[in-house]
Image (tube, grey):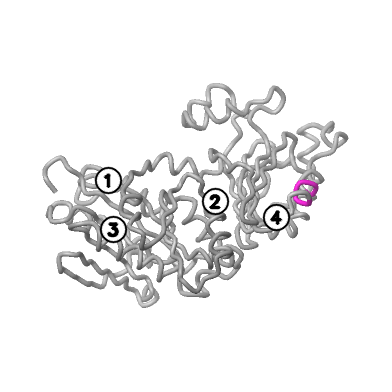
């Protein structure tokens, strides 16, 4: 690239390999002097990662990269950044397309490129993230979000200890992307396609949705990408939940409350709450853990609960500066005279969603007036049912 001009990078993800490859081919065909980098993790069990680089100038190169510390993702990171830096320095290409392995989380790779370095030089000096694309098959989307199979069951995992499900990976890929490339086949039912696109709009309302083959992808893929804003958008502590809506049989319900959950009643309700939606997410608090913000991340019948750090209401004023301005602003915006920034905020998205039943069940899990009167010291004696999902209460 000429001096002072950074190499634009587009990250392309997607569990649906045929659609992902089609998106890559479309970018390669329609963007002059584009180059594609792909690391195939299918042979990672044998200690190697297969790297392929090809472009629309007739150049192709393949190599086998040894694993770093037995970690496929580490090998990808250690090899990808130097290759991108080399391509940028050569100046022959005007776009680099990083095609991810099936189960890869685009946030990890995107942030690694944006904040990484190669050969002592910051990648931000020679590259810029132009966009993050997730390619999907509209008709297979809702079945995929309902699927509890592990990535490893289909050879799409990224590490030996990767225990994520297909649904979890798919949801994350969609929600992080700035553009969603949708493949539509002639034999697919129109209703399935409309429902799939409606689901995409619910999961990532700010993404541009384009149809593969319509000539819209190159522009959408290179429209620009704010790495920090994207991280905030998917962070349980900062994410703004999608607005309540219903279209083509897909609905999103947003539930809010101030008082804490009774840990035993909520834990018992998980068997009904988690499978009630193809996707649910948000943040919540438990009465016996009154200082901790918890993240709720569920897809395909699987729930992950994350310790997101303290509620700012539980910290002395002098410790607020240890948290980001965005975190402090979010706390102030949701401040309550009694509870501070502590509150329940959960969003459920599904086809044929039972909004009434979910609301009633969630309401029943909150502390009653009598339980609330016991105060925080009394709440700490409640059974610690979430010890299986979190560290024990100290």
**At 63% from the left edge and 45% from the top edge, which residue is drawn?**
245
Residue 280 relative to residue 43: left or right? right
Question: What's the distance in space between the residues labelled 2 and 4, CA to CA?
Answer: 14 Å
Which residue in the protein does label 4 denote?
353
**At 72% from the left edge and 34% from the top edge, which residue is drawn?**
258
**At 58% from the left edge and 70% from the top edge, which residue is drawn?**
149
Nearer to us: label 1 or label 4: 4
Question: What's the distance in space between the residues labelled 3 and 2, CA to CA?
Answer: 24 Å
**Magenta-drawn stretch contains 235:** no
Task: Report the number of discs.
Answer: 4
Question: What's the distance in space between the residues labelled 3 and 4, CA to CA?
Answer: 37 Å
In this view, 70 is above or below 177: below
Q: Quadrant of residue 95?
A: bottom left
What x and y, as percent, mark residue 97? 28, 58
Contact between labelled residues 1 and 3, with CB atoms less than 8 Å apart: no
* Sequence-earlier tag: 3 or 1: 3
Whether residue 165 appears in this view of the structure is no
Contact between labelled residues 4 and 3, with CB atoms less than 8 Å apart: no
Task: Give the main secondary structure of the magenta stretch.
Answer: helix
Q: Secondary structure at mark 1?
A: strand
Q: Secondary structure at mark 2?
A: helix
Which residue in the protein does label 3 denote?
97
Which of the two residues, 131 or 189, is positioned nearer the viewer here?
189
* Sequence-earlier tag: 1 or 2: 1
What x and y, as percent, mark residue 392? 67, 49
Which residue in the protein does label 1 denote?
128
Label placed on residue 203 = 2
Residue 282 relative to residue 57: left or right? right
Whether residue 195 appears in this view of the structure is yes
Residue 165 relative to residue 291: left or right? left
């Amino acid at each position: 690239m000429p001096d002072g001009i950074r190499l634009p990078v587009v990250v392309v993800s997607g569990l649906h390999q045929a659609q992902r490859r089609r998106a890559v081919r479309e970018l390669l065909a329609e963007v002059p002097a584009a180059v594609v980098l792909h690391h195939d993790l299918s042979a990672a069990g044998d200690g190697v990662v297969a790297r392929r680089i090809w472009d629309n100038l007739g150049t192709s190169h393949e190599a086998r990269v040894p694993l770093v510390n037995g970690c496929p993702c580490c090998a990808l990171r250690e090899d990808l950044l130097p290759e991108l830096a080399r391509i940028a320095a050569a100046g022959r290409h005007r776009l680099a397309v990083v095609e991810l392995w099936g189960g890869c989380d685009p946030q990890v790779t995107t942030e690694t490129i944006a904040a990484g370095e190669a050969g002592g030089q910051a990648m931000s000096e020679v590259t810029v993230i132009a966009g993050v694309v997730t390619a999907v098959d509209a008709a297979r989307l809702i079945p995929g979000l309902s699927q509890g199979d592990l990535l490893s069951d289909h050879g799409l995992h990224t590490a030996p200890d990767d225990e994520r499900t297909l649904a979890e990976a798919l949801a994350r890929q969609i929600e992080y992307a700035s553009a969603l490339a949708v493949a539509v086949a002639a034999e697919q039912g129109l209703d399935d396609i409309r429902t799939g696109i409606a689901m995409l709009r619910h999961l990532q309302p700010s993404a541009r949705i384009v149809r593969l083959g319509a000539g819209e992808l190159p522009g959408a893929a290179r429209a620009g990408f704010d790495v920090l804003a994207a991280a905030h958008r998917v962070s349980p502590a900062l994410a703004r939940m999608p607005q309540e809506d219903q279209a083509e049989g897909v609905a999103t319900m947003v539930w809010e409350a101030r008082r804490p959950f009774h840990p035993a009643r909520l834990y018992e309700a998980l068997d009904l709450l988690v499978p009630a939606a193809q996707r649910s997410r948000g943040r919540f608090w438990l009465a016996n853990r009154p200082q901790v913000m918890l993240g709720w991340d569920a897809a395909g019948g699987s729930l992950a609960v994350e310790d997101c750090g303290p509620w700012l209401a539980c910290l002395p004023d002098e410790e607020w500066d240890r948290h980001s301005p965005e975190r402090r602003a979010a706390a102030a915006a949701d401040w309550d005279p009694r509870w501070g920034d502590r509150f329940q905020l959960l969003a459920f998205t599904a086809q044929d969603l039972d909004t009434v039943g979910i609301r009633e069940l969630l309401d029943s899990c909150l502390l009653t007036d009598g339980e609330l009167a016991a105060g925080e010291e009394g709440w700490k004696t409640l059974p610690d049912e979430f010890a299986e999902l979190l560290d024990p209460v100290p």
